[in-house]
Image (cartoon, helix red, strand yellow):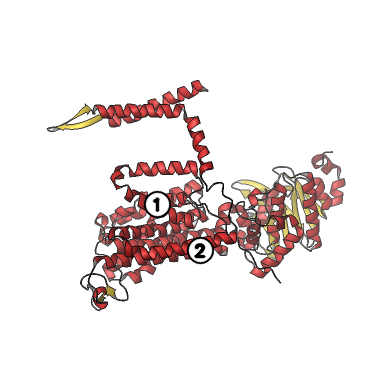
Amino acid sequence: MLVLEDVHTHYGKIEALHGVSVEVKKGEIVSLIGANGAGKTTLLMTVCGNPQATSGRVILQGRDITRDLTSNIMRSGIAIVPEGRRVFSGLTVEENLHMGGFFNTKSEIRKSQDHVYELFPRLKEREHQRAGTMSGGEQQMLAIGRALMSKPNMIILDEPSLGLAPLVIKQIFEIIGKLREEGITVFLVEQNAHQALNLADRGYVLETGRIRLHDTGKNLLANPDVQNAYLGG
Amino acid sequence: MAAHNLKHALFCAIVTLIISYPILGFNLASEGTTVTLEGAKTSTVVGVLLAAVIVFLFQLFRDTLMGSLRQLPAVNPLTNRKPMEQSKRLKLDSVLLTLMIIGALIWPFIASRGAVDLSTLVLIYIMLALGLNVVVGLAGLLDLGYVAFYAVGAYTFALLSQYYGVSFWFALPIGALLAALFGLVLGFPVLRLRGDYLAIVTLGFGEIIRILLNNMTNLTGGPNGIGGIPDPTLFGMEFGRRVKEEGNTSFHETFGIAYSGEHKVIFLYLIALVLAVITAIAIRRLMRMPVGRAWEALREDEIAAKSLGLNRTAVKLSAFTIGAFFAGFAGTVFASKQGFISPESFVFLESAIILAIVVLGGMGSQMGVILAAIAVTILPELAREFSEYRMLIFGAAMVLMMVWRPQGLLPMRRIHIELKKQE
């Protein structure tokens, strides 16, 4: 579904990714874990074409998107839940969702909206509330719901557990599991390594711009190095 | 705390003295060929001292004063009012709008000529403010050179009529489209800028246009401006006493009524009214369309908007272009109303006033912007005797507004779009 081949990304003269290769297969949940500044977000942004990779290739559903415009990439069956949620705080929940389905027809929007409300009954209750007035967990649900509105084949989540209560995190991860059952491929980037790897089919460990480890989620959880570095021993 | 206040108040009073005494306390008097400096009248000096005392007292009791000022919104019935039901509000909105339009239609036949003329100006400002509202209020792009597009519209008509004898009705769409084109051209380079930087570049653009108009003497007549801009005609009927152009008839002869200079004024007013209503309706529709929501989304969070596949360039350009389009509209009407235009009419102050209207009215709110446009244009006319202090009053009004209602007269309310439930 999504393949990164030896991707190098620069911010100006500084190289942030030193040849990263990642593959996400259809129907999988793949987790990418790593410490602060390892390049997790850079990797995601490179997939979105902002900034573009300086060398290497990014292939989405068999198509080379390395040099595509961000707006075009984001319209080709992929959706991202950005770090820090970034809901439109002045718009209502419903309007936020409609923005997610911006390029779809009205009837498609209606369908996906009902579907999102099914996944997150909480959002239905808050339909006409301004997004900025909701709690962090609700906003995260909204951000995921908004990403689902475009009916993506693949969804990328950037630190969905950031700043949320443990109970809410559990809920969010349950939803991510549900997405897989619906056939949506999930690429999950997390600092919360334990939960991310527990849920994932496969995992990658990113360290200072390089992939250090790559294995199934279970094996990575059992790996002593990973345990030491990311799971608190 | 008290000692601190005293010190601060003393400091403010001294600053007041330092600023005002050298300016007001001395006069330049000419004695023959030389100029001498002499002290001002005692009353002026007393006035300056009095001002310092007032500043001192105000600063001393500022906390108590401002505290009681903040209490005032509680008296203001609007603040604690519960938001109305959406359907009820929309109904009230449309009733109010209809009443306003009916009132505006009757107005020229009961008001004096001067009042109608002023109302035309108000309508022009309404058009300008509504257009700028798209750029600043909805898309969140701070444009300080908006008057440039107004100038483009006005000069398009003036030049076309001067060189090619083009009539108002032909020039109107051309002026608006040309202004929109300028908006597009300006949009491209400035799109990567944000906030303050965007403001500076647009400010520069506004000045460039004005200076160009001033210096392209061969084409625009420079500071002398362009005169003799024709009035609009009604299906080939002119409003002057005598017909200027061959093939046209005159309005009063066709209808067999006595000639009156008022006809033209009323006609211009009605044209401005129709255009203002068209502007309001067009922008209202745009706001509810996906492009309107895209503007707001981009204003709220650029990265999130991009993550949803919105093309930032296209969205921003559309806001800029549409805003400029309506400024071109207003410019054409303005040129026709004045009959004479010069770069003087398109200075930065105009941009600032239009921006002030948008901010005072409540960013993004159409009704608020219309009310503010009326207030800002008419108040200085009513306070003619204080014309010297116009800007002072204006500034004071702005400060008071920011204290009382920082969100504007009628802040924008979100329009909900409800999809029909499937049966």
Residue pictured at 59% horizontal, 62% vertical: B87
Between the residue at mark 1 and the residue at mark 2, the CA separation in whole angstroms equals 21 Å
Q: Chain of mark 1?
A: B
Residue pictured at 32% horizontal, 51% vertical: B381
B106 sits left or right of B413 in the view: left
Q: Which residue is mark 2?
A: B94
Q: Which residue is mark 1?
A: B375
Near mark 2 (Cα within 10 A), the count class, few <14, some 14-19 or many ≥20, is few
Would residue A35 be visible to someone looking at this image?
A: yes
Q: Position of residue B331 (x, y in %)?
A: 36, 61
Q: Position of residue B10 (x, y in %)?
A: 42, 23
Amino acid type assigned to the residue bearing label 2 in the image = Ser
Residue pictured at 65% horizontal, 63% vertical: A101
Element under label 1? helix
Examine the rendered structure and indicate whether residue A202 appears above or below residue B405.
below
Q: Are marks 1 and 2 on the same chain?
A: yes
